[in-house]
Image (cartoon, rainbow, N blue to C red):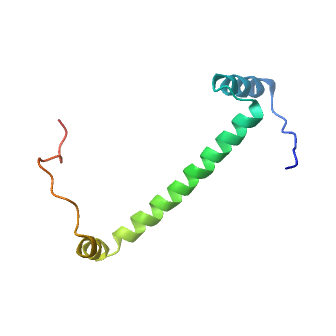
């Protein structure tokens, strides 16, 4: 894969070097890791929004419960905080 240079101020460079070193990584590896984590975070946010839209449709939860049996019964009430 081709490489490129990213110019940042020295404070940002030093911060990135410190964060990378704390994880035992080079800055290059650290930035690749962070970029991957951010991509996954965005994908999860998109999936969560799609799921929330889907379950907000009338009848979807009832159809799901009918098909898969709903949630299992609980032995105690967990609906309130301790």
Asked whether 47 or 70 is in front, the reply is 70
- Picture coordinates of residue 76 (x, y %)? 11, 47
- Picture coordinates of residue 21 (x, y %)? 69, 23
- Picture coordinates of residue 43 (x, y %)? 56, 57
| Left or right of 41, for residue 81 | left
Residue at image position (29%, 72%) is 64
- Picture coordinates of residue 9 (x, y %)? 80, 28
Q: Residue 15, relative to residue 54: is it above or below?
A: above
Q: Residue 14, relative to residue 45: is it above or below?
A: above
In the figure, residue 16 lies in which quadrant?
top right
Residue at image position (66%, 40%) is 33
Residue at image position (77%, 27%) is 13
Q: Residue 13, relative to residue 50: is it above or below?
A: above
Asked whether 47 or 58 is in front, the reply is 47
Q: Where's the C terminus, which quadrant?
A: top left
Residue at image position (28%, 71%) is 61
| Left or right of 2, for residue 41 | left
How many badges with numbers are in the image?
A: 0
| Left or right of 17, for residue 74 | left
Q: Residue 33, relative to residue 45: is it above or below?
A: above
């Amino acid at each position: 894969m081709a490489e490129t240079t990213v110019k940042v101020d020295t404070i940002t460079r030093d911060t990135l070097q410190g964060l990378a070193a704390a994880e035992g990584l080079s800055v290059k590896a650290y930035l690749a890791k962070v970029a991957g984590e951010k991509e996954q975070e965005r994908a999860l946010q998109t999936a969560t929004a799609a799921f929330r839209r889907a379950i907000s449709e009338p009848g979807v939860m009832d159809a799901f419960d009918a098909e898969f049996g709903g949630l299992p019964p609980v032995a105690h009430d967990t609906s309130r905080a301790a």
